[in-house]
Amino acid sequence: MSGDLVSLRLLLIAASGPVHEIWREGTTQASVPIDFDAGDAADARVMLAKGGIDVCVLDAALSNDDKAAVIRSARKAKAPAPVIFMTAPRGASSPENIDGRLPKPANAAQVRKLIEICIRARMPTKVLIAGDSDTTRGILSKILKASRFTLDVHEALESYAALSQLRAGQFGLVFLDRAMPGLNGADTLKQIKREISDLAIVVMATPQEGAAAGRSLSGTLALLKKPFYAADVDAVLKRYYGLHAFEAS
């Protein structure tokens, strides 16, 4: 897969031939060319060892042992490691160390929608961290750079620099500290909403600041309360990539 995502290699791991076929049909309708492979757990381990897989999709119908073996192989794959999803019916449990859960598709049209989520999750995303705290920026940058999603992380120490970068670059996501130099976070947030309508905004704030923000948080992706942890940032990323609804089901 190249940096501009001209194609994507997807590996489906499922025991059922009919499941392979609806995914194969769905891939032909995707917005970018899909190099599609399908097989059982043993096939998958061989293909993963060779590298070059962008996305692995596990069928929940596989045995727990097969799921665990495939996940281990995917995590050992040559860099860049694939993103791992599992398709499962509502209420099914998820194995550890996957990147997200998707609903189990019944036909090729539903597969096409899931593939668009896979494409979005694998597409490089430019991210800006805007805030004057070296500690907050450092922690967040470390978490984002360790993510298995493809993130190009940039930083700005004050609001005017943040606005300048956002105006000049094709950013998909900004983490905005509500308290920072220049314009305050609330005014910076208003300006971003006014100028860049397709940008996902995550506001970082103490619980007290978040409660006081009120309506200003409308239209933002999430409120990230300080202190936050890797799991909190991961939940925000899943919301950004459209996985949160399936995780909660």
Image: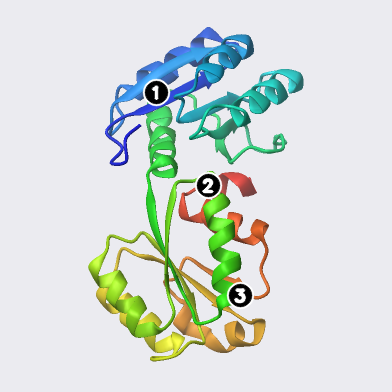
| Neighbourhood count class around disc 3 (C-alpha, 10 Å): few under 14, some 14–19, many 20 upward | few
Mark closer to the chain start, 1 or 2: 1
Q: Label 1, label 3: how many angstroms apart (C-alpha)? A: 47 Å
Callouts 2 and 3 close, C-beta under 8 Å: no
Q: Dot 3 lies on which element?
A: helix
Decide if residue 248 is in sight here: yes
Instruction: Name the residue beneath numbered marker 3.
Output: 135
Query: Which label sits in the foreground, 1 or 2?
Result: 2
Q: Which image quarter: residue 44?
A: top right
Quadrant for the N terminus, please: top left
Q: Say few, some or many: other residues with alpha carbon within 10 Å of mark 1 (under 14 / 14 to 19 / 20 or more).
A: some
Q: Position of residue 238 (x, y in %)?
A: 54, 51
Which residue is pictured at 40% across the width and 25% down the height?
A: 9
Q: What numbered label is drawn on residue 108?
A: 1
- The residue under label 1 is which amino acid type? Ala
Q: Rounded to the nearest whole Å, what is the CA distance between mark 1 and mark 2?
A: 19 Å
In this image, 72 relative to 105: left or right?
right
Secondary element at tag 1: helix
Residue 13 shows up from this direction: no
Label 2: few (<14), some or many (≥20) within 10 Å? Answer: many
